[in-house]
């Protein structure tokens, strides 16, 4: 099981690293925009502190542009994974990256059929978005179950990176299903630490410790 940090915020990534909870990092244009940095600078800064895969998303939506942009991103550091929005042109570019030996992540996956095509195109990773499916009254983790089953059926090596995680339950449910990677925002990592009974238990032990002779 691997945990990635779903953030472009250096302090959030450092905080996860301090707990040994940063096997990699995923970013997207929205996360980069929050940093106030350019895409290039934000990715460089992350690569300077993260040894594992750093997923950097292209903005182009046609094959040639995706390919060129991905090649530029992959020059930043040897741990860059080129993140590509799921689309017809993205699948064509994925095949080219596969032939070049460059790791990819097909993102914005919302159906098992998209995950099948991504794997067949040679994607190293897929990012199914559980939270955004929940947002439209679908059960996001059902998609994880479908993709895990299909990939297992055919011994497909494409990694399932569960994305759009909004709660600890998304992580637990996806872990029970056997997903490979969870990309988790800092806020959810903190929520995962907590349990009210743990807090109450600590308070009681400290209270009772005052009675020591
Ligand atoms: C992965 O990196 C995705 O872009 C990210 O998890 C999306 O999360 P959101 O749906 O909360 O924006």
Image (cartoon, rainbow, N blue to C red):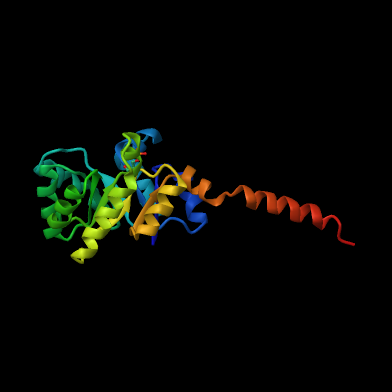
Q: Is residue 212 left or right of residue 33?
A: right
Residue 66 in percent (x, y) is at: 15, 43
Farthest bottom residue in view: 155
Residue 24 in percent (x, y) is at: 37, 55
Point out the quarter of the image occupied by ligand 1: top left
Farthest right residue in view: 213
Q: Residue at x 37, y 54 (%)?
A: 174
Total number of numbered discs in the rendering: 0
Quadrant of the rendering where the N terminus is positioned: bottom left
Q: Residue at x 52, y 55 (%)?
A: 18
Of residue 36 and residue 128, the one placed in the foreground of this image is: 128
Q: Is residue 157 visible?
A: no
Of residue 12 and residue 203, the one placed in the foreground of this image is: 203
Q: Would you identify the image quadrant in which residue 30 lies?
A: top left
Q: Is residue 57 visible?
A: yes
Residue 199 in percent (x, y) is at: 66, 49
Q: Is residue 4 left or right of residue 39?
A: right
Q: Would you identify the image quadrant in which residue 125 lies?
A: bottom left
Q: Residue at x 19, y 57 (%)?
A: 102
Q: Is residue 106 left or right of residue 36?
A: left
Quadrant of the rendering where the C terminus is positioned: bottom right
Residue 169 in percent (x, y) is at: 44, 48
Q: Residue at x 75, y 52 (%)?
A: 204
Of residue 148 and residue 163, the one placed in the foreground of this image is: 148
Task: Identify whether 213 is placed above or below 48.
Answer: below
């Amino acid at each position: 099981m691997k945990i990635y940090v779903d953030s472009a915020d250096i302090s959030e990534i450092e905080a996860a690293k301090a707990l040994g909870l940063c096997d990699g990092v995923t970013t997207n244009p929205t996360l980069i925009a929050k940093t106030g940095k350019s895409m290039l600078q934000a990715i460089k800064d992350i690569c300077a502190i993260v040894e594992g895969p750093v997923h950097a998303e292209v903005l182009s939506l046609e094959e040639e542009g995706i390919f060129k942009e991905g090649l530029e991103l992959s020059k930043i550091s040897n741990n860059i994974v080129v993140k590509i929005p799921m689309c017809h042109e993205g699948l064509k570019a994925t095949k080219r990256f596969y032939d070049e030996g460059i790791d990819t992540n097909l993102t914005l996956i919302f159906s098992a059929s998209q995950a099948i095509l991504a794997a067949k195109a040679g994607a190293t990773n897929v990012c199914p978005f559980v939270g955004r499916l929940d947002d439209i009254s679908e059960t996001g983790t059902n998609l994880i179950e479908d993709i895990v089953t299909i990939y297992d059926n055919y011994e497909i090596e494409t990694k399932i990176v569960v994305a759009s995680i909004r709660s600890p339950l998304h992580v637990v449910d996806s872990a029970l299903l056997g997903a490979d990677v969870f990309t988790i925002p800092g806020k959810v990592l903190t929520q995962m630490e907590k349990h009210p009974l743990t807090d109450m238990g600590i308070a009681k032990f400290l209270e009772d410790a005052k009675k020591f002779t």
